[in-house]
């Protein structure tokens, strides 16, 4: 148990090939391997110029060729010597470390992490391209995947009984020195941005860090003019008093003309009620 609630579908393989489970990490590696094969065939056909439509160029993206943000990583022509070896190592890293991330977080979170790694650098390069033109081709995200694994399992033993966290720190330091030595500022920028993203993503998913909440200004509700209930109530009471006074005047006129005996039972009740109210007012004043 890893403490994360994931559905059964999120933990199941994408497909099966001859009883071998294919997970998201394997699928990503398969896409990159196919891209290298296609690039090799295109170059074999002397049509390498077609690959320029897939590479990232900030000027072209700003002109509307947005697909380059997504296709730049598919340009993986087979190199010579260390180029091929480095590609193979990257694929192995994605399978090993990516699969462990997928086991822990589930497929959806792992894919969210990898898509973020894949798009982070070209998006930032597009912003930088507003001032300086930027170019980029080929990306596997293998090192960022390893950094995420080292953040998740910092105390796992690797080769020569070295903890994963120390391997990650040493590799970041070495790559930083190499970039500084060759004045590779773009490579240095990509290294630190992807490293920070991988570390921050895992820490965020584990709840070790939280993002600041943005409190956007809300539109104030419109004020409604409500009727003055007190005024209405006062008017109603005054109207009741006026009606009572008019009824009393009518009763007094009747008594003066025909005498007290001419009053009906209802009129006698009204007269008694009015007398009680008058006595209460006098006692209140005194």
Image: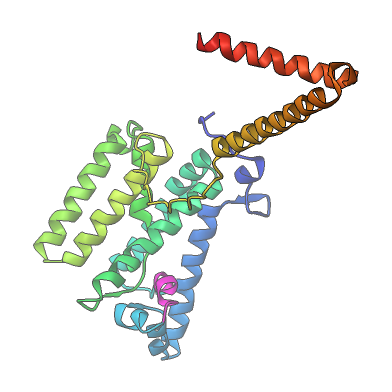
Residue 181's place in the image compared with 245, above or below, is below
Foreground pick, 202 / 139: 202
The rendered magenta stretch, by its main secondary structure, is classed as helix
Check residue 244 for magenta coloring: no
The residue at the far bottom in this view is 46
Residue at image position (28%, 37%) is 165
Q: Quadrant of the N terminus?
A: top right
Residue 96's place in the image compared with 78, above or below, is above
Query: Image quarter for residue 77?
Result: bottom left
Residue 53's place in the image compared with 270, above or below, is below
Residue at image position (37%, 78%) is 55
Foreground pick, 231 / 62: 231
Residue 245, x across and y down, in percent: 69, 29
Decide if residue 31 is on the left or right side of residue 178: right
Residue 140 visible (yes or no): no
Residue 247 visible (yes or no): yes
Residue 167, x across and y down, in percent: 26, 41
Foreground pick, 137 / 286: 286
Residue 177, x across and y down, in percent: 13, 55
Decide if residue 253 is on the left or right side of residue 136: right
- State which region is magenta: 65-74
The structure's colour scheme is: rainbow
Residue at image position (61%, 45%) is 10
Foreground pick, 134 / 221: 221
Query: Image quarter for residue 84?
Result: bottom left
């Amino acid at each position: 148990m890893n403490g994360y609630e994931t559905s059964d579908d999120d933990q199941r393989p994408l497909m099966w090939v001859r009883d071998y489970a294919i997970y998201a990490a394997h699928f990503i590696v398969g896409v990159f391997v196919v891209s290298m094969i296609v690039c090799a065939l295109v170059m074999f056909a002397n049509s390498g110029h077609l690959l320029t439509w897939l590479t990232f160029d900030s000027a072209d993206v700003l002109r509307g060729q947005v697909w380059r943000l997504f296709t730049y990583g598919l340009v993986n022509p087979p190199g010579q010597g260390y180029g091929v070896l480095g590609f193979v190592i990257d694929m192995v890293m994605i399978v090993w470390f990516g699969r462990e991330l997928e086991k822990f977080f589930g497929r959806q979170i792992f894919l969210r992490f990898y898509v973020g790694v894949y798009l982070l650098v070209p998006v930032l390069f597009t912003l930088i391209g507003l001032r300086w033109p930027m170019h980029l081709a080929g990306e596997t995200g293998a090192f960022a995947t390893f950094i995420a694994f080292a953040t998740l399992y910092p105390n796992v033993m690797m080769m020569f009984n070295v903890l994963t966290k120390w391997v990650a720190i040493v590799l970041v330091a070495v790559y930083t020195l190499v970039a500084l030595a060759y004045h590779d500022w773009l490579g240095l920028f990509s290294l630190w941005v992807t490293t920070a993203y991988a570390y921050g993503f895992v820490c965020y998913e584990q709840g070790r860090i939280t993002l600041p909440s943005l409190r956007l200004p809300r539109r104030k509700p419109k004020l409604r003019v409500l009727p003055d209930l007190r005024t209405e109530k006062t008017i109603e009471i005054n109207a009741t008093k006026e009606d009572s006074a008019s009824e009393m005047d009518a009763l007094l006129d009747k008594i003066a003309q025909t005498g007290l005996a001419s009053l009906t039972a209802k009129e006698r009740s009204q007269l008694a009620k009015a007398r009680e109210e008058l006595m209460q007012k006098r006692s209140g004043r005194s």
